[in-house]
Structure formats: structure tokens, C-alpha cells
Image: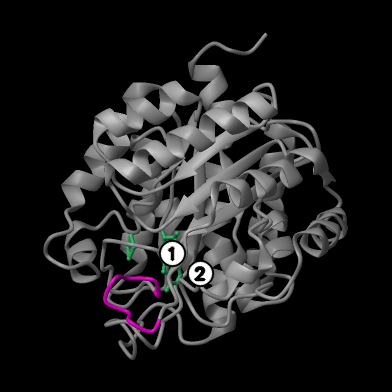
């Protein structure tokens, strides 16, 4: 799909035409990837962060955050919960740290999870910008997927939402390094940022295509009262329902453009609407990431406020998610790792 077509989808206002676009995107997903929806168990292992992004609730300058690092045992317990429930994969996410203690801690956890699960659980990392050497160490210890959102593909917008020490080109270089090492590569953007335009979102989808991305996680932006972006006007969505519709159109346009990739229906969608994630699946998403972090830590991992499921137990999230996915007519693919078809085909790993 070319940029004009993507833009037309994002600008569409006619509700029956929007419904048709979502149906088309879901049909593309079903024809290419079948009825399966994959689960990833999200473990938010620490909110300690050395960076200071202007949108993020756990930025280092936010002194009101109660900082934590889960213990190795707690992380392994969460991972084993996901494994036993039949999740194909877990995501280890945390604030950004690049000290040797942290790098070695992660390395050790990756090795331990692989040992305990006989490498049957795919490990995805979402630990921010690191050196190529660190990415290699973690890959060699057995983590083969990495999520690093570009946040926006517009460099000048990127610079407006980050302090000057953060660099857009370093972020792109990290994505290239991860791909070169052999990771299944995930990225994504926030939708409805201050200063963002519809053209920026069109370019985001072209960026996914040009970078040959395997997995996408994108969701609406929410202002957080303890961050510099609080109170900034947003031009492209004026209400939660408009923001939800725009986010769903982004999923649909991405699916139609890139049929073989994995696309997550993110928790942020659910923050806009109790059925946000189901709506995401109905617009072409094929991955859901239930939170399996121990409940006691969730209230301290607030990238944005009013986050759903903060007080839920991992088991409740699991039961709820299965029911909700089945309501969309799709099937939860348990005990399946759900590798990205985009990744498998380019690496000739299909039988
Ligand atoms: N609103 C929505 N998403 C956010 N993220 C961080 N802060 C916010 C916010 N205020 C997203 C970023 C980051 C991911 C882990 O969470 O895209 O990459
Ligand atoms: Fe932690 Fe952006 S504030 S990585």
C-alpha cells in the first residue's frame, strides 16, 4: 500500500467505511496467519530508569515513583507461571539501565529460564538502548526477540519528546544492530502525541516497512501529570473515542501494508475502552500481552496513569484474556511460540 492509501485510511471519517477497513484488515490477517492469536506474558521487572523521556511516568526525574527491582526468584516465578499456562513467549521489560550488574543479571535470568523450560519459552527483551556488545551477550544467552519502539519516525518530533542527550540516530542504529545480530525485531510508536501529524503516522508505517520489522506494538499516548508533556495540546485526536479510532486505523493500515508481521493489541488500547484489545484484534492485530508481573509491583510501573489491571492477579488476567479473545471469533494459540511469519520467511525457516 502506498502512502496516499495509508493516509486515506487514517483520515477516513465515514463509519461504515471505517468498519469495512477493519473487516478487510482482519480478513488479511486471517488469510495470511489464520485464526490464531498469540499470548506474550509481560514481566515488568524494574521501574528503575536512567533516562528521562518527556512522556514517561517512570522517567528518572519523577521523584514520586517508588522504585523497585524484582528479585531473580520473583522473575523466574512469573516466567514459569506464563510457561505453565501455555504462553509461547514472555517479554522482560524494564526501565533502561546499562550497568554491568544489570547486564549480567539479565544474562543470568535468560539462561535460567531457558534451562528450566528446555528452551520451549521464547524470551523477548524490551530493555531499551544498549551497546551492540550487550545485545550480542543477551542473544548468545538465549533471548531471540527484541522490542524497541522508535516512538515516532519523525526525527524532529522525536527530539521534541526527549531530552537533548537522547538521540534518534542512536535509536535507529540500535534497531539495525538488533536485526544484524539476528533478533526477531519489534518496534512501534505512540499515537496522538503532542505536535504529531497524520503524515507522521503515515511515515511511521513506511518506516516499519523500510526497516523490515517483524513485530509491532503501538498504542495511544496518555499524558502523565508528572512529566513535561503534561498539558500539551494534541492536534490529531480530541477525545478518547477519536484516539481509539485513530489507533485502530493505524493497526488496520499496518496490517494491510504488512500482512505477515505480528501486531499487538496493546494494554493502552484497553485503557481507552474496556474492549479496546478486542477491537484491536478485530482491526487486524494477532498478539495480546497479558501482564504476569506480581501484582504488588504493578502500581509502581505506571508509564501512564489510570492503567488497567493494576490490581489484578496474573491468573485473573489469564482467564479474562482467553474469554475476551474468543469473543472476537479467534483462537488463543496456547503452547505455540508464535514466531513472526515475516521473520520465518526471510530466514527460510518455514518447512
Ligand atoms: N503513554 C503511552 N505510552 C507510553 N509509553 C511510555 N510512556 C507512555 C505514555 N505516557 C510507551 C512507550 C514505550 C513503551 C514501553 O511504553 O512507547 O516504548
Ligand atoms: Fe525510561 Fe524513557 S524514561 S526509557
Nearer to the camera, 165 or 45:
45
Residue at the image point whose x is 54% and y is 11% from the top: 348
Total numbered labels placed on residues in the image: 2
Q: Splitting the image into four quadrants, where does ligand 1 fall? A: bottom left
Provide the residue designation for mark 2: 301
Q: CB atoms at circles 1 and 2 under 8 Å apart?
A: yes
**Magenta region:** 57-64
Instruction: Rate crowding at label 2 as few (under 14), some (14 to 19) or many (20 or more) other CA atoms within 10 Å.
Output: many
Provide the residue designation for mark 1: 47
Q: Residue furthest left?
A: 164
* Residue 164 percent coordinates (x, y): 11, 65
Which quadrant of the figure has residue 163? Answer: bottom left
Nearer to the camera, 26 or 343:
343
Nearer to the camera, 207 or 291:
291
Please say whether residue 60 is one of the residues in the magenta stretch: yes
Label 2 SS: loop
If the image is split into quadrants, where does the C terminus sit? top right
Nearer to the camera, 160 or 329:
160
Amino acid at each position: 500500500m502506498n502512502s496516499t492509501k495509508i493516509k486515506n485510511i487514517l483520515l477516513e471519517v465515514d463509519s461504515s467505511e471505517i468498519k469495512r477497513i477493519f473487516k478487510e484488515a482482519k480478513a488479511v490477517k486471517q488469510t495470511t496467519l489464520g485464526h490464531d492469536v498469540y499470548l506474550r506474558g509481560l514481566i515488568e521487572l524494574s521501574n528503575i530508569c536512567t533516562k528521562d523521556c518527556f512522556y514517561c511516568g517512570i522517567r528518572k526525574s519523577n521523584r514520586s515513583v517508588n522504585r523497585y527491582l524484582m528479585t531473580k526468584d520473583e522473575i523466574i516465578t512469573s516466567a514459569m507461571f506464563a510457561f505453565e499456562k501455555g504462553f509461547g513467549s514472555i517479554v522482560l521489560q524494564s526501565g533502561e539501565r546499562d550497568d554491568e550488574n544489570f547486564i549480567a543479571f539479565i544474562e543470568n535470568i535468560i539462561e535460567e529460564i531457558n534451562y528450566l523450560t528446555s528452551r520451549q519459552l521464547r524470551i523477548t527483551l524490551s530493555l531499551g538502548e544498549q551497546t551492540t556488545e550487550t545485545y550480542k551477550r543477551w542473544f548468545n544467552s538465549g533471548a531471540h526477540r527484541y522490542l524497541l519502539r522508535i516512538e515516532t519516525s519523525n526525527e524532529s518530533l522525536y527530539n521534541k519528546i526527549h531530552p537533548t542527550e537522547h538521540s534518534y540516530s542512536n535509536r535507529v542504529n540500535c534497531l539495525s544492530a538488533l536485526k544484524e545480530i539476528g533478533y526477531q525485531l519489534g518496534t512501534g510508536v505512540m499515537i496522538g502525541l503532542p505536535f504529531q501529524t497524520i503524515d507522521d503516522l503515515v511515515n511511521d508505517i513506511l518506516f516499519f516497512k523500510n526497516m523490515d520489522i517483524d513485530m509491532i506494538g503501538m498504542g495511544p499516548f496518555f499524558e502523565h501529570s508528572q512529566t513535561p508533556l503534561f498539558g500539551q495540546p494534541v492536534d490529531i485526536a480530541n477525545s478518547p473515542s477519536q484516539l481509539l479510532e485513530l489507533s485502530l486505523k493505524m493497526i488496520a493500515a499496518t496490517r494491510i501494508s504488512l500482512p505477515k508481521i505480528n501486531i499487538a493489541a496493546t494494554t493502552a488500547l484497553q485503557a481507552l475502552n474496556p474492549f479496546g484489545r478486542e477491537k484491536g484484534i478485530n482491526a487486524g492485530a494477532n498478539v495480546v500481552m497479558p501482564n504476569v508481573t506480581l501484582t504488588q509491583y504493578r502500581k509502581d510501573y505506571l508509564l501512564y496513569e489510570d492503567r488497567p489491571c493494576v490490581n489484578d492477579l496474573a491468573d485473573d488476567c489469564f482467564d479474562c484474556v482467553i474469554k475476551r479473545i474468543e469473543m472476537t471469533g479467534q483462537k488463543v494459540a496456547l503452547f505455540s511460540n508464535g514466531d513472526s511469519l515475516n521473520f520465518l520467511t526471510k530466514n527460510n525457516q518455514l518447512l
